[in-house]
Amino acid sequence: MTNIIVKQMPAFKKAYKKLHTNEKSSVNDAIRSIIQNPIIGEEKKGDLAGVFVYKFKIHHQEILLAYEWNPRERLLLALGVHENFYRDLKKKK
């Protein structure tokens, strides 16, 4: 398998930085899943076409991780809870 480049957008970096260490490990696991299988997330439609969202849980709370991908790269767009997630994501797109 070739090396996959993982890039982070500012919105993702900002959300990731606020997490506790144990929460970051859950996010890192999710990122590894996306690297191995980029179609694991749900592809969005309309304004967010081309954006995939992978859902996972931290402390029984559903977390959404938005990303775009091509065969060589994963671009991490945003990370957060469902509330206002898609609204904010559309603003940044």
Image: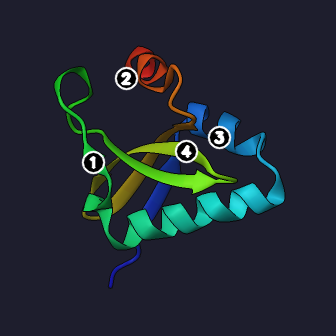
Where is 84 relative to 15, above or below? above
Closer to the chain start, of discs 4 and 3, is 3
Q: Which mark identifies residue 13?
A: 3
Q: In which quadrant is the N terminus drawn? A: bottom left
Judge whether residue 59 can be spotted in this image: yes
Mark 4 burial class by Cα count in 10 Å: few <14, some 14-19, many 20+: some
Q: Residue at the front extreme?
A: 60
* Colour setting: rainbow
Query: Looking at the image, which residue is at 44% across and 20% down?
Result: 92
Q: Where is residue 29 shown, x and y percent of the image?
A: 57, 68
Closer to the chain start, of discs 2 and 4, is 4
Where is 22 relative to 17, above or below? below
23 sits to left or right of 72: right
Mark 2 element type: loop
- Depth check, front residue: 70 or 15: 15
Q: Where is residue 52 shown, x and y percent of the image?
A: 31, 45
Q: CA distance from mark 1 to mark 4?
A: 13 Å
Q: Residue at the bottom extreme?
A: 1
Please give the residue where the numbered disc 4 appears in the rendered image.
Answer: 63
Closer to the chain start, of discs 3 and 1, is 3
Please give the residue where the numbered disc 1 appears in the rendered image.
Answer: 42
Please give the residue where the numbered disc 2 appears in the rendered image.
Answer: 93
Query: Looking at the image, which residue is at 43% across and 24% down?
Result: 89
Q: What amino acid type should be assigned to the residue bearing mark 1?
A: Glu
Q: CA distance from mark 2 to mark 4?
A: 19 Å
